[in-house]
Image: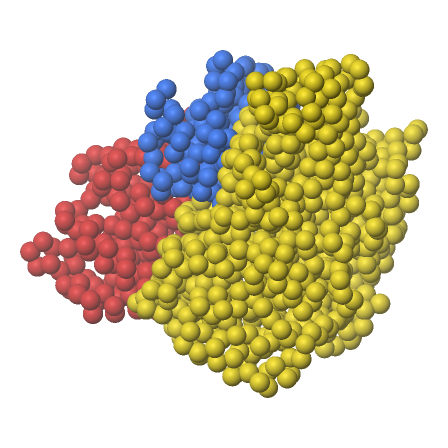
Chain colours: A red, B blue, C yellow
């Protein structure tokens, strides 16, 4: 298997990156870790005249946390740098869990957080966690920068709002609220290096006095073209004490809101069933994690 | 289209011209004649092609050679001790029966190196997670886990 | 001293692999690691239709591409072949007709793989598409779609065996159980893709093929047929093989194509398959659909078995003949069955061909038999363990099909698993969602006949001993990863009282080494063991006779050991082994020994009688304890217990490796693996991210045990180990699921989805 020919570019600054993108536009593709784009190009699923490698741009990777402001993760940050960040494991456990589920240690040493989002695979692990954490994305081109919520950025199966002359600069994740916790769960056939049958990320805050759910985001993966916020299910829990009956009801609602398809891994019916199981388990896990 | 790149492979510096679209594995196997790196699936699913780049385990079958400018690469041929004897991980794989056909072995050994560099004393579960992407069809993995446990001990007493 | 009680010096020791250092250094030479001077590269163009006539192939554009040396089509490869030399249908490139999606239709040789790949895209093919059939039941019940003209209703094989009186036995049974099971098509999944380098010399008109293949001599024979070349003008050399599991038994289309391209260009041609090609052309295990009827007395004694057995062969004949009759033979063991009726059919479909995979024919038979025994136990109120013990074969048992079990420790295996797993305390008594399942199996240690009918010995070994070559053994075996290179050295070292590293071994070369039937059917340590031992003993006799004179000691007082030849009555009287060799060589010349082995021939005459009889059988018993997530359907293996009778374990560490590896492959077939063909006839999972073989996290720890055993008919007491342990895994897991959730799933693989369906949750 061979790659079709292309021109390889490796800008060292974001300025050069913008310049190259504005020059080559649709003919260019951004190469970050390459763990998705290279196999797809080997299988002739798509081609590019120019591959612009962003791994040499130092300002695009890094993890920075500011109390009150939250977390900034550069788009080209390697997944294993996130996996081994004590800060992220401590404060953003759902993100840590989702990163750990991506491929193998080798894949995580290569792949980037931005790549996992920009591929916009419906089965990607990190986008549901990031959406549940309320992540925003910063998008940059020569014309300027814009910010939007990640949940608005991913538009469909392998489609994002990124324009040909733009690149994803970073993820902005709000600071952790007191009384909150996040968890990620998934269903696969094999235990590792797997494409998920279904996944879920939950982030919620519980009022320490009233014990009622104050804030919640539930996001499903692999059961819709995009990371799917199940807002009806969220509304069942909001303002309520999350007892077994409410959780059961919300979990069922998650299944109802999911839009799964039949594929080689599982039928839509199976997916819908396990979404509610997964939702119930992950909701309970998240609630128990609230300190 | 060619690009001239500098590589350090197994402590030897190279300056070679590679096609922009050339894969690292093909450059390692064909240009550098280091055939210990194995291509099995060719699309990043089995980890047989694992090499270390700046001490991290990387899949050479889905890495562009052009993207390795200035990198320090270790292939299986560079695993041995400085004096040419077998590295304790290599010795442990032989002694514990972790080698059968040997096709996954180079990738397995390098992934083990990366694992033990990060976690010198892994539990059995951590070993399996650290090698979770390295497929082997011969051994059933038990003797590979045994070998990694043994290697960890050898390295600690070294 | 009987053989059985003999103290071995190196047999029975866990000797690490002699080529281990090369393998961990990446220095081992696999076929794809070889480059020859002037070598060019070949690629094969796959058909993108499922069934149709080839109307026109236009290669004109491809020929003009710079770097292209030659292009061939089916017209260049007209002679069909079959691995069992029976009803050949397959040509390396499709002739007039394409019969499955992905079948090769043209091939290119070019300066590099990239150019060859580009040239393939420039070859244009016009087809007249034909309707196709994908399911075996559909295929045999119609005749509008005829895949090969010579097979009516696409029935490749239709045969029957009848032993005793099944109908009568069923009449006299306490009850007869009837059920239907189906097993999945799976792929070998070896890590090293097929590679062939053909090197034809236009001047000498001789051909050398470097090829990762399990059966070099059979490959040579097939090449001779299809290339119309004298056998002895062809040399097959086998570099190190990166796993075989049956998938490197058949000569691949790529190997023949490489030869034709090399003949055409006069240059060495290398073809390395992609993973996709390995899946589509690799011929894995046949899917099956088996209806079983089995009668029992009220004491649980099996009265008879009636098997209606259908396997899906895909597009070509392949190993079909051997697999079908081997399945028939496997019904007769490891339980005593007086009455057996077997009706078998192998049906052709427009799918990639199915062939031989580790545990040939066994999974398809073990599943129905082991599941039905459990059901019978339930009905009788007898533990499945007890039921198996009551029916277990013992040494000396002669099955109705004239299959003789000369040695068996099967009962010991059952008892060992019973005791360590606590099976009787757990079965039927674990809480809902937890279960334990039992299954057993056996496997042959080499068959009775050669693939191409001939009376020659199945194995020959030669040994040459002299100052220049040391002790050098020549055999025709292939090490496919199982460790034959180490174990054969152990055998020779044992005879001569030497160290493993004192023995040189030449094999995997049809010109340098004597004929061998090849590495399949778990025959190597037994058959080659006999040949090597005989060769070494012959040389040893001569050496001792000579040395006795020099030492002034009677020959029968001398023995080899500790790298010396010594007097057994006065061990101080000794001579260094290699000094003895030098003396022998200086005065007599090189020392040679030769030995051969031919297995006992079939004793009865019935259809399929050649396939099944074996000089020895290995046995394995397994109990698997599982936990089913009854909400998601996932099966988690908690404990896996195994006990096996492989005769004398020549190298216990290697035996464990075979058991663990076999079980891992069995777990893959049971839980994850499935060759999936879509309604268009395309395999939709020909890669390691959709076809899921178990990874490190999927494999439980195994409590395996090598039961004390010694087969006196074997050169060093050993029997089969490489294939048997895989086969009981699927039925054991099926039985465990039944115990855990109270519902029996009768189809593999046991996906979470099927479990939830069985539970009525989806």
**Which quarter of the figure is the C terminus of chain B placed in?**
top left
Q: Residue A195: x percent and y percent?
A: 46, 52
Q: Nearer the viewer, residue A157 or C48?
A: C48
Q: Which residue does the image show at 51% across and 40% down from the upper left?
A: C652
Is residue C368 shown above or below C187? Answer: below
Q: Nearer the viewer, residue C444 or C141?
A: C444
Left or right: where does residue A231 sit relative to residue A80? left
Q: Is residue B49 visible in the rendered structure shown here?
A: no
Asked if residue C755 is positioned above or below residue C637 in the image, the reply reads: below
Percent coordinates x, y for residue C496 in the rendering: 65, 28
Q: Report the front residue among C112 and C271.
A: C271
Q: Among all residues in the image, which is located at the extreme bottom?
A: C171
A159 relative position to B61: left or right:
left
Q: Is residue A70 left or right of residue C686?
A: left
Count of picture labels: 0
Instruction: State whether residue C153 is above or below residue A128.
Output: below
Q: Nearer the viewer, residue A3 or C113?
A: C113
Residue at 65% over, 74% down: C340
**Residue sitting at x 67%, y 47%:** C523
Find residue C561 and report its horizontal and vertical position in percent.
59, 26
Residue A158 horizontal/vertical position (percent)? 48, 51
Judge from the rendering whether residue A133 lies leftward or rightward of residue C427; answer left or right. left
Residue A86 in which image quadrant: top left
The quadrant where residue C460 appears: top right
Judge whether residue B149 can be spotted in this image: yes
Query: Which residue is drawn at the image coordinates 54% and 28% (left, top)?
Result: C24
Q: Quadrant of the N terminus of chain B?
A: top right
Above or below, C622 against C276 in this view is: below
């Amino acid at each position: 298997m061979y790659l079709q020919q292309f021109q390889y570019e490796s800008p060292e600054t974001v300025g050069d990156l913008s310049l190259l993108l504005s020059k080559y536009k649709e003919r260019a593709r951004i190469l970050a870790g390459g763990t998705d784009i290279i196999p797809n190009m080997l299988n002739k699923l798509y081609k590019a005249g120019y591959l612009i490698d962003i791994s040499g741009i130092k300002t695009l990777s890094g993890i920075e946390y500011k109390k009150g402001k939250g977390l900034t993760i550069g788009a080209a940050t390697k997944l294993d740098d996130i996996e081994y960040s004590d800060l992220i494991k401590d404060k953003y456990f759902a993100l840590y869990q989702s990163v750990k589920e991506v491929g193998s240690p080798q894949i995580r040493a290569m792949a980037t957080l931005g790549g996992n989002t920009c591929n916009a695979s419906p089965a990607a692990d990190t986008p549901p966690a990031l959406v549940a954490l309320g992540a925003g994305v910063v998008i940059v081109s020569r014309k300027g920068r814009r910010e939007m919520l990640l949940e608005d950025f991913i538009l469909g199966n392998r489609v994002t709002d990124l324009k040909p002359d733009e690149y994803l600069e970073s993820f902005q994740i709000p600071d952790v609220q007191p009384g909150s916790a996040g968890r990620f769960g998934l269903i696969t056939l094999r235990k590792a290096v797997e494409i998920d049958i279904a996944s879920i990320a939950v982030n919620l805050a519980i009022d320490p006095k009233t014990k009622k759910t104050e804030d919640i985001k539930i996001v499903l993966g692999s059961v819709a073209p995009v990371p799917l916020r199940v807002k009806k299910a969220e509304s069942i829990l909001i303002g309520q004490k999350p007892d077994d009956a409410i959780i059961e009801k919300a979990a069922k609602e998650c299944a109802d809101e999911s839009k799964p398809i039949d594929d080689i891994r599982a039928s839509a019916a199976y997916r819908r069933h396990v979404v509610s199981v997964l939702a119930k388990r992950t909701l309970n896990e998240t609630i128990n994690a609230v300190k | 289209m060619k690009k001239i790149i500098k590589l350090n492979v197994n402590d030897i510096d190279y300056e070679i011209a590679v096609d922009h679209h050339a894969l690292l594995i093909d450059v390692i196997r064909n240009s550098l004649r280091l055939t210990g790196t194995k291509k099995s699936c060719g699309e990043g699913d089995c980890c047989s092609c694992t090499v270390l780049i700046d001490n991290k385990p990387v899949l050479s079958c889905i890495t562009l050679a052009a993207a390795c400018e200035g990198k320090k690469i270790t292939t299986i041929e560079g695993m041995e001790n400085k004096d040419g004897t077998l590295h304790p991980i290599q010795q442990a794989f032989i002694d514990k029966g972790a080698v059968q056909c040997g096709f996954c072995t180079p990738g397995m050994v390098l992934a083990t190196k990366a694992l033990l560099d990060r976690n010198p004393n892994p539990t059995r579960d951590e070993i399996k997670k650290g090698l979770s992407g390295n497929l082997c069809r011969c051994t059933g993995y038990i003797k590979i886990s045994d070998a990694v446990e043994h290697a960890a001990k050898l390295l600690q007493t070294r | 001293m009987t053989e059985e009680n003999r103290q071995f010096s190196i047999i029975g020791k866990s000797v690490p692999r002699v080529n281990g250092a090369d393998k961990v250094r990446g220095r081992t030479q696999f076929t794809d690691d070889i480059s020859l001077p002037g070598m060019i590269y070949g690629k094969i163009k796959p058909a993108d239709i499922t069934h149709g006539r080839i109307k026109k192939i236009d290669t004109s554009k491809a020929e003009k591409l710079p770097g292209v040396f030659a292009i061939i089509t089916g017209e260049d490869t007209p002679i069909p072949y079959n691995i069992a030399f029976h009803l050949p249908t397959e040509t390396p490139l499709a002739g007039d007709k394409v019969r499955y999606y992905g079948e090769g239709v043209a091939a290119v040789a070019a300066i590099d793989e990239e150019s060859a790949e580009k040239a393939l895209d420039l070859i244009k093919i016009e087809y007249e598409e034909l309707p196709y059939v994908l399911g075996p039941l559909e295929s045999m019940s119609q005749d509008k779609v005829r895949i090969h003209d010579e097979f009516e209703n696409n029935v490749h094989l239709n045969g029957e065996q009848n032993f005793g009186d099944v109908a009568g036995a069923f009449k006299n049974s306490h009850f007869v159980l009837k059920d239907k099971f189906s097993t999945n098509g799976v792929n070998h999944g070896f890590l090293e893709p097929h590679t062939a380098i053909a090197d034809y010399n236009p001047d000498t008109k001789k051909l050398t093929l470097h090829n990762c293949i399990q059966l070099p001599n059979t490959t040579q024979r097939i090449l001779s047929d299809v290339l119309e070349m004298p056998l002895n003008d062809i040399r097959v050399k086998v570099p190190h093989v990166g796993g075989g599991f049956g998938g490197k038994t058949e000569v691949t289309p790529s190997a023949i194509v490489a030869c034709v391209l090399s003949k055409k260009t006069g240059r060495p041609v290398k073809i390395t398959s992609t993973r996709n090609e390995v899946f589509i052309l690799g011929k894995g295990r046949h899917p099956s659909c088996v209806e079983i009827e089995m009668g029992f007395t009220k004491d649980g004694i099996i009265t008879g078995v009636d098997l209606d057995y259908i396997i899906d062969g895909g597009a070509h004949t392949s190993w079909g003949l051997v697999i079908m009759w081997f399945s028939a033979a496997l019904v007769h063991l490891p339980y005593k069955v007086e009455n057996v009726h077997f009706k078998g059919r192998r049906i052709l479909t427009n799918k990639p061909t199915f062939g031989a995979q580790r545990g040939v024919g066994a999974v398809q038979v073990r599943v129905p038999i082991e599941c039905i025994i459990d059901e019978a136990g339930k009905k009788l109120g007898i533990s499945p363990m007890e039921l198996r013990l009551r029916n277990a074969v013992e040494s000396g048992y002669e099955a109705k099909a004239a299959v003789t079990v000369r040695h068996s420790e099967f009962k010991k295996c059952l008892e060992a698993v019973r005791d360590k797993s606590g099976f009787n305390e757990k079965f039927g008594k674990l809480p809902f969602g937890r279960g334990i399942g039992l299954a057993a199996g056996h496997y042959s240690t080499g068959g009775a006949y050669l693939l191409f009918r001939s009376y020659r010995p199945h194995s020959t070994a030669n040994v040459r001993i002299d100052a220049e070559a040391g002790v050098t053994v020549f055999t025709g075996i292939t090490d496919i990863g199982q460790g034959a290179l180490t174990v054969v050295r152990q055998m020779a070292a044992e005879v001569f009282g030497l160290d493993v590293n004192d023995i040189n071994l030449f094999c995997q070369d049809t010109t340098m080494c004597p004929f061998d039937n090849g590495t399949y059917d778990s025959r190597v340590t037994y058959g080659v063991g006999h040949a090597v031992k005989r060769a070494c003993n012959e040389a040893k006799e001569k050496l001792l006779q000579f040395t006795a004179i020099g030492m002034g000691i009677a020959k029968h007082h001398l023995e080899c050991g500790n790298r010396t030849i010594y007097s057994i009555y006065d061990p101080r009287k000794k001579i260094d082994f290699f000094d003895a060799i030098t003396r022998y060589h200086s005065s007599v010349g090189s020392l040679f020994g030769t030995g051969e082995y031919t297995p006992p021939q079939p004793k009865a005459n019935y259809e399929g009688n050649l396939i099944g009889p074996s000089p020895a059988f290995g046995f394995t018993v397994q109990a698997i304890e599982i936990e089913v997530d009854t909400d998601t359907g996932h099966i988690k293996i908690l404990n896996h217990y195994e006990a096996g009778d492989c005769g004398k374990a020549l190298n216990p560490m290697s035996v464990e490796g075979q058991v663990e590896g076999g079980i891992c492959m069995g777990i893959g077939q049971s839980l994850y693996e499935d060759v999936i063909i879509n309604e268009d006839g395309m395999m939709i999972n020909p890669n390691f991210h959709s076809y899921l073989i178990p990874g490190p996290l999927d494999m439980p720890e195994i409590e395996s045990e090598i039961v004390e055993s010694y087969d006196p008919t074997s050169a060093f007491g050993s029997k089969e180990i490489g294939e048997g342990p895989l086969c009981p895994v699927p039925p054991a897991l099926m039985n465990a699921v039944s115990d855990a959730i109270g519902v029996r799933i009768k189809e593999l693989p046991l996906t979470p989805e099927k479990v939830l369906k069985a539970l009525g949750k989806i």
